[in-house]
Image (tube, grey):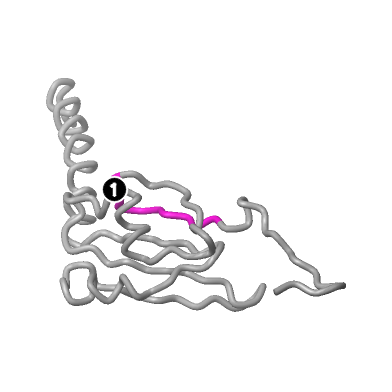
């Protein structure tokens, strides 16, 4: 119950953002709902983990002070861990980063390098090598 001289601060919607980046189906910015949003809800709202990313790792980066950050880690390949994510409440300005499995990073690297190497080889053979 409010009393005389009580002050109520209503935070702007913009102050309750959570940033969803990385290997998600729909990287996006989400807003806390009545000041609450679980990690599971946020992952679901972002379309879930991109299926081509392999066994993804989820990191939540939270600012504690201007110079201090806290990083939480979730192994998204573990169904039990995903169940625990329902109890992990996000806070305003949290950054949720979904990393990809190392084998997928290697595959993407190869996919980018091979066409360039092939083009270099073909142009070298087309013009002759000295």
Please provide the residue range marked out in magenta: 17-25
Check the image and report above or below for 108 versus 68. Answer: above
Q: Indicate whether 38 appears above or below 44.
A: below
Report the residue that reaches farthest toward the right. Answer: 5
Closer to us: 44 or 95 = 44
Instruction: Report helix, strand or loop for mark 1.
Output: loop
Q: Is residue 4 left or right of residue 32?
A: right
Q: Which residue is mark 1?
A: 47
Instruction: Residue 20: give x, y in percent of width and height.
Output: 42, 54
Dot 1: within a 10 Å radius of its alpha carbon, few (fewer than 14), some, or many (20 or more) residues? some
Residue at 23% over, 36% down = 116
In the rendered view, tell whether residue 23 sits above or below residue 73: above
The quarter of the picture where residue 102 lies is bottom left
Where is residue 106 shown, x and y percent of the image? 20, 56
Residue 21 belongs to the span the image colors magenta: yes
Image point (21%, 32%), residue name: 120
Which image quadrant for residue 93? bottom right
Left or right of residue 84: residue 38:
right
| x then y, percent, for residue 11 | 67, 59
Q: Is residue 56 magenta?
A: no
Quadrant that contains the C terminus: top left
Tally the numbered discs: 1
């Amino acid at each position: 119950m409010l009393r005389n001289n009580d002050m109520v601060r209503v935070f702007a919607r913009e102050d309750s953002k959570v940033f969803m980046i990385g290997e998600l189906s729909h990287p996006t910015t989400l807003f806390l709902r009545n000041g609450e949003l679980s990690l599971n809800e946020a992952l679901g709202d972002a379309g879930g983990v991109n299926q081509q990313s392999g066994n993804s790792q989820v990191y939540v980066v939270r600012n504690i002070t201007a110079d201090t950050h806290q990083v939480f880690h979730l192994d998204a390949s573990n169904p039990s861990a995903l169940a625990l994510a329902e109890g992990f409440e996000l806070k305003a300005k949290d950054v949720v980063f979904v990393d990809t499995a190392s084998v997928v990073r290697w595959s993407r690297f190869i996919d980018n390098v091979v066409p360039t190497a092939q083009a270099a080889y073909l142009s070298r053979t087309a013009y002759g090598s000295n």
